[in-house]
Every structure is written in structure tokens, then in C-alpha cells.
Image (cartoon, rainbow, N blue to C red):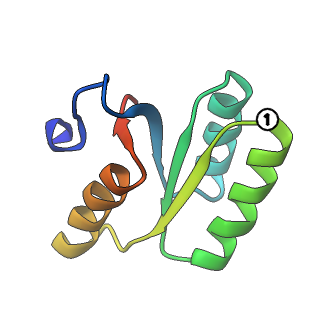
Amino acid sequence: NDTNLRSDPGLALPAVVITGGLGIGRALAEEFARDGHNLVLVARDKAKLDRTAAELASAYAVEVKVTAQDLTTVEGCAGVEQAVRGFGFYADV
């Protein structure tokens, strides 16, 4: 339920949350970054996420945050919600 990821837009910045931030997710992230959107990338491999985030932030001057989570678990899904809020974002897309 994405309403749990949303907060008052006046208090947080919008971000695009991309699950599977590698592969096809990477291509989607690049498209959103090119259009100036802040990103939260989610996958299990933190090292790859960190590399991707650095590349996208450098190339497109957007804020890119990462959270390594296993979305096949309840804990992983809750971790994404906590991370998005902790980054000062709300899930816009």
C-alpha cells in the first residue's frame, strides 16, 4: 500500500522509488533521473546500488539514495518505507 510511503509533500521531497534498481530498474532510474527526479533505488546488492547511485547522481545532478532490502519479506518491504521517510522523501512514483 503506497499510502504508507506518502507524507505531506510540504514536509518531504518527492522521489521515484525503483525496485530492482539494477538491470531494467537501472534503465528506468536513468530515465527518471534525466527528467530531474530524485530517486530511491531498492535491491539486495548494496555495493551495486551504491555504484549505480553515484553514477546517476553525477550524470544527472539529482539526489539518489539506496536501500538494500529483500522485497520477498515483510521486513524488507517495511525497510523500504522506513528508508524513504528517513531520507526525507515521499514516494511520488
Q: Nearer the viewer, residue 53 or 48?
A: 53
In percent of width and height, residue 19 lies at 45, 53
Give me the residue at 15% from left, 43% from top. 4
In percent of width and height, residue 88 lies at 39, 45
Residue to which mark 1 is pinned: 60
Give me the residue at 31% from left, 50% from top. 85
Task: State the count of labels.
Answer: 1
Q: Residues within 10 Å of mark 1 (few under 14, many from 20)?
A: some
Q: Nearer the viewer, residue 31 or 53?
A: 53
Check disc 1 and report its element: helix, strand or loop.
helix
**Quarter-wise, where is residue 77 in the image?**
bottom left
Q: Residue furthest front?
A: 11
Give me the residue at 37% from left, 28% from top. 92
* Image position of 56 (left or right of 63): right
In percent of width and height, residue 58 lies at 83, 47
**Quarter-wise, where is residue 31 in the image?**
top right
In percent of width and height, residue 32 lies at 62, 30
Give me the residue at 66% from left, 25% from top. 36
Considering only vertical position in the picture, is 65 above or below 93? Answer: below
**Quarter-wise, where is residue 55 in the image?**
bottom right
Q: Amino acid at mark 1?
A: Tyr
Considering only vertical position in the picture, is 27 above or below 81? Answer: above
Quadrant occupied by the C terminus: top left
